[in-house]
Image (cartoon, rainbow, N blue to C red):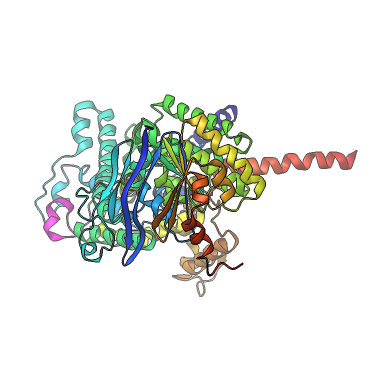
Amino acid sequence: MAENVLRLEDVTMQFGGVVALDNFSMEVNKDEIVALIGPNGAGKTTAFNCITGVYEPTNGRVSLHGEVIVENHPQGKMKALYKGENDGKYTNVVSHTPDRITYRGIARTFQNIRLFKALTVYENVLIAKHMRARQNVFSATFRLNAKEERRMRDEAMALLEEQNLVHLKDSIASSLPYGLQRRLEIARALATEPSIILLDEPAAGMNPQETMELTSFIRQIREEYKLTVFMIEHHMDLVMKISDRIYVLDFGKQISHGTPSEVQNDQKVIDAYLGVVEDAED
Amino acid sequence: MENKRIQNLTSVVFLLALFALVIFLEQVIKPTDTMAMLLTVTKKSAVYALVAVSMNLLNGFTGLFSLGQAGFMLMGAYTYAIFTIESERRDSVYYYFDQVVNVSLPETLGGALGSVGWLVGVLLAIILGGLVAAGVAYLIGFPVLRLKSDYLAIATLGFAEIIRAIFQWRMLGPVTNAANPLKSYVRLSDFKIGTGDAAINISTFVAVLLAVVCIGIIVMLINSSYGRAFKAIREDEVAAEAMGINLYKHKQIAFCISSFFAGVGGAMLAMFANTVQANNFKSNMTFEILLIVVLGGIGSVSGSCIAAVFFIFASEWWLRGLDSGRFLGIFAPGIFRNGFRLVIFSVGIMLVILFFRRGLMGDKELPYYVKWIKDKLTTQKPKAGEANG
């Protein structure tokens, strides 16, 4: 059996009375490319936010390499309000801030690019290196550990070289064209030295040509950095071409799961995307 | 790399020239000269430059809009004064109270090690002032740093006022002398080489040197990996957190370091002002410093320094004539009377803000503009050549 990298068990996220993610379980194995698809508002980004610690799920558990990184059960007011299943199955509370989760090896990009806009390309990547630097404020300020600083700079530079961004090193991040901003955001995520990368709609706003390039780019980073990739995507071309497995969400619930061809031929998926048969006359 | 070395060398040469100029002026200008005011305002602007830069570290580089600067300066000033009051004069300073702190660091160390010990004692007292401010900032940080933008500003402003009230509290009189001023501690004017009439006064030099060293440390912090993390927090908190930057820890670090240097600035202000009284550290002072930061450019260290010099020179020296009836050789006591200076001053600030919306320097530093001017000059030259050819 393939090694489990990321595993979600019964993750439920409820905002007041709205169940954004309902009893969602899934797993991502080592070296896989797994996609999460679904119509708008299906809860895809909510799932990402539960994994990366931006939200605390109402119920459920997330583990990375077998180690629990997020776990919660309905508490306080939520106890009475809770509409999901499996309450009482989880008893621990494990909660980390996003930075701790990134430190454990999950990197992510955002749906609407979140670069450090006023800083240069180089600085953007360099900031991601800060987390793993062995230094404190004192030694960093007085350059007592110059080797560490040089190592950070060299690694950031090497990463920019690999991503063909060296010539743009000193340009301001917000001045880059859209496609390059996406690429920089991925480069920045890679700089945190992750074991799994979560891409939130990497092809959003790209033309077919750029989407083609992105397809090979994602494959390439998987090989080069020995990464596992978990992504949300709307471009079906890209998803079907690249994914090993696909999970489909609709209204927070998982409605299908399987290889691209299995998912493509699943009536439930077709219904979710096109509406039920009676309505889908055109 | 080569470029950076040249830049570093240029700044070192520039600073050495500045020190030489200060020492030279200090020897040339006699206390009775009309130019003697130059030395006074230089000292004060050194203090304000340091405090403005420390505020900029928080407001401009970390994106935390804090207004607690006066409170932290007050703590630095009091701590410094309490630990350097001459033991002979203690009874007259603490007239109404039985003083608790009976140590004078410069005297104790000076007695043991001579003038070097005295200097170390003064430095220790200054650093202690900074540490007290940083320690209190650390405690205040727990509740306050969970707030954002305006709410953070209001909370820190409130804490600064609370600190001022506490220092005036009668029950603390044995330590802080309550609402009465502290005096007879080591002042800037005590910095002399030699004794008697032949003594060389180096007070301005000491003020400028202290400010330059502290600002230098802040600049080094900003250019380090931690400085980059601060900027990341300023740019986008969510993305910074996703890059593994612990928001709370880094905000706490920035807050404490900024307060440390505000405390040092407060100690220097005490050395400059000859007396310390909690009543002087009102929120007004914070707003003066904020004004300097905004005028100089939020996120520019050199901008804060330049704005501090202009602000202090203008308000304390150049425009003083407007208060007393004579300005730029015009004698018109009917118009130039008390308060007119403030009118001119406000108009001037409004003009600066109108024409330089992001402050004098924006978020760029001095070398950027030097390079910009150089580029302008070099691109013009070939054009002139073409015209001739």
Image quadrant holding the N terminus of chain B, namely top right
Residue sitting at 13 percent across and 60 percent down?
B170
Name the residue at the right extreme.
B389
Residue nearer the viewer, A54 or A36: A36
Residue drawn at 36 percent across, 47 percent down: A51
Q: Is residue A237 visible?
A: yes
Q: Is residue B184 visible?
A: no
Residue found at the far top of this picture: A147
Above or below, comparing residue A192 to residue B63 in the picture:
above
* Residue positioned 38% across, 41% down in the render: A102
* Residue nearest the viewer, comparing B96 with B286: B286
Q: Quadrant of the C terminus of chain B?
A: top right
| Magenta highlight range | B168-181
Is residue A23 rendered to the left or right of residue A281? left
Image spot of residue B357 (x, y percent): 56, 60
Q: Is residue A250 left or right of residue B365?
A: left
